[in-house]
Structures are given as C-alpha cells and as structure tokens.
Amino acid sequence: MVELSEKMATNVQPERTASMIQVGLLVVAVGCLAAAPLFLYPIFLMKLLCFALFACAFNLLLGYTGLLSFGHATFFGGAAYFTAHAVKEWGVTPRSAFSSVSRAPRCSGLWSDSSPFAGRASISR
C-alpha cells in the first residue's frame, strides 16, 4: 500500500514541474516581445509578425482542416494589387480605389471558375 502512494506522489511532481517550466517560458517570451522594439528595427518586427501570421494561417489550414486552399490569398492579393495599381498608375484617390476593390477579385473568381480545370483539381493518393 505504501508503494502505491509513493508512486502516485512521484507521478505528480513531473507534471507540476512541466507546468512551471511552461509558465516560465511564457513569461520570458512575453518579456522578449515587450523589449523587442527597443533593440530591433520596427519594420523588421512588422515583417516578422506578418510572417508569423501567415504561418498561423498556414498551420490552421493544413493542421485543422487538412486542406490547403490558396483561394483566400488570391482574393486578398488581387485586391491589394488592383488597389495599388489604380492609385499609382491611374491617379485614382485611395478612397475610390478601395470602393472599387471588390470588383477585381470577383472578376478573377469568375475567370478561375470558368477555366477548363475548375472542379477537376482532386488530389489522389
């Protein structure tokens, strides 16, 4: 009977130690993030956070759903490109470019839907 209680007592300690290590690492990570703007270039930090956001979205698509779709990236990328092109080349005001942004991805969506390969992109293993 004593051996059983000793085994139970020793099994609790590693779990508690692991959670304390995780809390410690979290505190260190938050401290590093808070101090990062003091030591690193802000533009680099913004790019780093953009890549981290992309990695999280990529992980969500592949990890949770098991399906990778670049349709959302095409939609937002096309809208951003169209807006920048309209403002720079055509001299359109940013406000009117933003209002017309929804038309370009719709057209690209119609174009990709009408392609001969639409609906045939199944992956066989």
Image: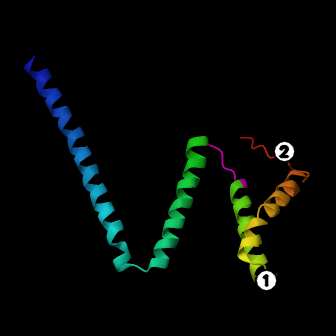
Residue 117 in the image: state x and y as whole percent: 87, 50
Mark 2, residue position: 120
Residue drawn at x 43%, y 80% as measured from the top left: 41
Above or below 98: residue 62: above
Residue at the limit of the structure toward the left, as seen here: 2
Residue 118 appears left or right of 98: right
Magenta-highlighted residues: 66-71
Mark 1, residue position: 91
Q: Amino acid at mark 2?
A: Arg
Residue 82 in the image: state x and y as whole percent: 77, 71
Residue drawn at x 85%, y 59% as measured from the top left: 107
Residue 99 in the image: state x and y as whole percent: 76, 66
Residue 121 in the image: state x and y as whole percent: 80, 47
Residue 35 appears left or right of 91: left
Q: Quadrant of residue 11?
A: top left
Q: Amino acid at mark 1?
A: Gly
**Foreground mark, 1 or 2?**
1
Q: Circle 1: is it few (<14), some (14-19), or many (20+) Cα within 10 Å? A: few
Q: Circle 2: is it few (<14), some (14-19), or many (20+) Cα within 10 Å? A: few
Residue 111 appears left or right of 55: right
Image quadrant in which the C terminus is located: top right
Residue drawn at x 91%, y 52% as measured from the top left: 114
